[in-house]
Amino acid sequence: MFEVSSLTRRLGSSTIATRAFVVLMKKVRVTTPWIACLTTLLAGSPVAHAQQPASGEPVQVSVSGSVRSRVETLSGRMSGEAPASDHFLSLLTLLKAEADFGGMSLVGEIQDSRRLSGPLTGAAPNEVDTLEPIQAYVSWALSDPEQAGDSLGLELGRFTMDVGSRRLTARSHFKNQKTSFDGLRLLWRSGELGEVIAFRVSPVIRQPFETSAAASNKPKLNQSHEASVFSGAHLRRVLTDGVSGEGYVFRIDERDASDFPSRDRRLTTYGLRLYKAPETKQVDFDLEWAHQSGRSRATTSPADTSDLATNAAMSHAEIGLTFAIPTSPRVSLHYDFASGDRDPGDDLHERFDPLFGDRSFEFGPTSLWGVIARSNLKSSGLRLDWRPTGSSEAYVSLRQIDLAESRDGFSLSGLRDRAGASGKEVGVQLEGRLRWRPASSGPRLELGAAHLTKGSFLRNAPNADTSGNVVYGYSAATFDF
């Protein structure tokens, strides 16, 4: 383990950035190579000064929010145990307030996600979270008045997080409930050196657990899973004009709690990313790779006490081109891989854990759909994005879906052929979305649909449903204020 005292000597003790970083690192378990990376970046940080409000300047208070109504329908199923059809009418309300005292802010956000119509079973109850404070934190902002672009922020309390590509840690945009964390987060930005995010948090678990209570919109405050600690550091830096690089390490340590069984994950995930944002008449790309190691258990059952060594990996490759013609179409090729468990009978666990990432921006809608997950996956696809008008955007995506390992399960379907006799071909997913705002002050409207053509695995796996393909559609209207 890297000694914090050694880090202090290398960075010096005069900067606020150093002192705040050392306090955080005393609580976050980070391996030596990544500490060295952070040391290199922070060594050049200037002396930071608190931003003080002008004398007599009033506190700046802002309030914002949104109300989204969405109806979803699902026909067909992958597993014989799932409902043959499903529907869900939901209402999601978000209300956020921020008080800025100049250098210090208080931030709070309430989420109210309700089921208005839909079965009491199925996926819908998992999307309900009534009258829940998803953010409540105090934020300190520091900056150097002599060097523009350098700043240090520290947040303490409950908050949501978007980190890097959002594939492993994200605030979901499609789901009705947002994943929150209780803890500490540090954000340092430099106009010359890039950005560093470091955090030590505990995930917040949705309450109530009972399906009937959730489906009835029963309010109950969510609880911090204190038996689980999620920590990490993420670095981003501009490498050349338009090309950025990222490096990160995440660590999760958890154990069973009396009211929340877990897989007792003790996993370290480290990865690299290289990307270039889309621009007209230019080729863009997004390359990411991550590796996971440590120990975990195969199930969440309290009776499962067998610790398995973990060796898993994930990769994403994307290349696109935006054309300089009306509607600005962008065509992109995609490939995603996430390892699966090769042998369910050995003492090695090889299924990649997507942690707290979002999948809707790449793999399609979640909620009642959520066909693809970043585990045991091989998938290649073609996507077309375009802007039909100045106030609208659309895309259509076609993906071939296969298993990385034939003896492991697929996504969250509950289907698994331990003998591997059902093959690896899951099927083909076709999905698309249209968003537009008819008037500048009016609601944002959205339509989406998806179709899954079943492959050999979904037709032949034990307990698979063979009645036909799966079709999904939704429409939504969002009012911002």
Image (spheres, grey):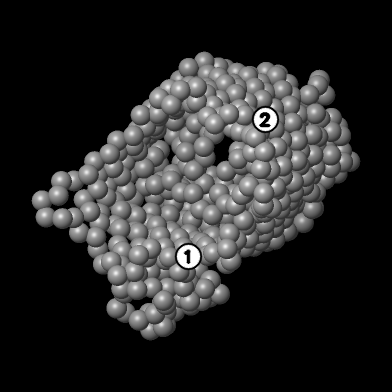
> Residue 86's quadrant in the figure?
top right
Q: Residues within 10 Å of mark 2 (few under 14, many from 20)?
A: many
Residue depicted at x 18% and y 55%: 53
Could you tell me residue 101's position as x and y percent?
21, 50
Residue depicted at x 46% and y 23%: 439
Which is more N-terminal, label 1 or label 2?
Answer: 1
Q: Which residue is mark 1?
A: 194
Could you tell me residue 210's position as x and y percent?
49, 29
Residue depicted at x 51% and y 53%: 163
Q: Which residue is mark 2?
A: 432
39 is higher (above) or lower (below) than 329:
below
Q: Nearer the viewer, residue 429 or 481?
A: 481
Q: Nearer the viewer, residue 177 or 197?
A: 197
Residue depicted at x 37% and y 32%: 65
197 is higher (above) or lower (below) than 157:
below
Could you tell me residue 394's position as x and y percent?
62, 31
Q: CA distance from mark 2 to mark 1?
A: 35 Å
Give the total number of marks visible in the rendering.
2
